[in-house]
Image (cartoon, rainbow, N blue to C red):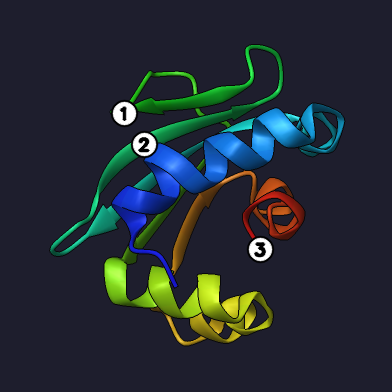
Amino acid sequence: MPDARTSFTTVIPEKIRASPERARAVGGVVLFKISGERGGVWTVNLKDDLGVAEGDQGRADCTIELPNEVWESMTADPRGAMNFYFSGRVRVLGNAVLASKLQGILG
């Protein structure tokens, strides 16, 4: 189970490159704000200019905020994401429907 930094610098970009049509099917830009050690802020473009950029690129359709330990748990078992959301450990701002489409590219 990779930490957030490894996920956003290596794992997610590889998944986007391996399956750009699957990434583009998500159809949005998502800002991730991951707190804690090995956390950070990343913009994931799954709309037009596919890829991951460090920091807030200013054009997110959806923002997802969570601690790194929750990120690690969700990447180990993506089916648990909704439990974290409903327990308040994951916060989604903006287009929540877009967030629900992420499992295919992040999981």
How far from the left and from the top, in percent, is residue 76? 53, 78
Q: CA distance from mark 1 to mark 3?
A: 20 Å
Q: Residues within 10 Å of mark 1 (few under 14, many from 20)?
A: some
Q: Would you name the residue on which mark 1 appears?
A: 54
Q: Are marks 1 and 3 in contact (CB under 8 Å)?
A: no
Residue located at (66% from left, 63% from top) = 107
Q: CA distance from mark 2 to mark 1?
A: 4 Å
The disc at residue 42 is: 2
Q: Would you name the residue on which mark 3 appears?
A: 107
Indicate which disc, 2 or 1, sits on the residue closer to the N terminus.
2
The type of residue carrying mark 2 is Trp
Indicate which disc, 2 or 3, sits on the residue closer to the N terminus.
2
Q: Is residue 75 above or below residue 24?
A: below
In this picture, residue 21 sits left or right of residue 59: right
How far from the left and from the top, in percent, is residue 68? 29, 67
The type of residue carrying mark 3 is Gly
In this picture, residue 91 sits left or right of residue 50: left
Q: Are marks 2 and 3 in contact (CB under 8 Å)?
A: no
Indicate which disc, 1 or 3, sits on the residue closer to the N terminus.
1
Q: Secondary structure at mark 1?
A: strand
Q: Are marks 2 and 1 in contact (CB under 8 Å)?
A: yes
How far from the left and from the top, in percent, is residue 69? 30, 76
In this picture, residue 107 sits left or right of residue 36: right
Q: Is residue 44 above or below residue 69?
A: above
Q: Secondary structure at mark 2?
A: strand
Residue located at (55% from left, 83% from top) = 86
How far from the left and from the top, in percent, is residue 65? 37, 57
Q: Quadrant of residue 1?
A: bottom left
The type of residue carrying mark 1 is Glu
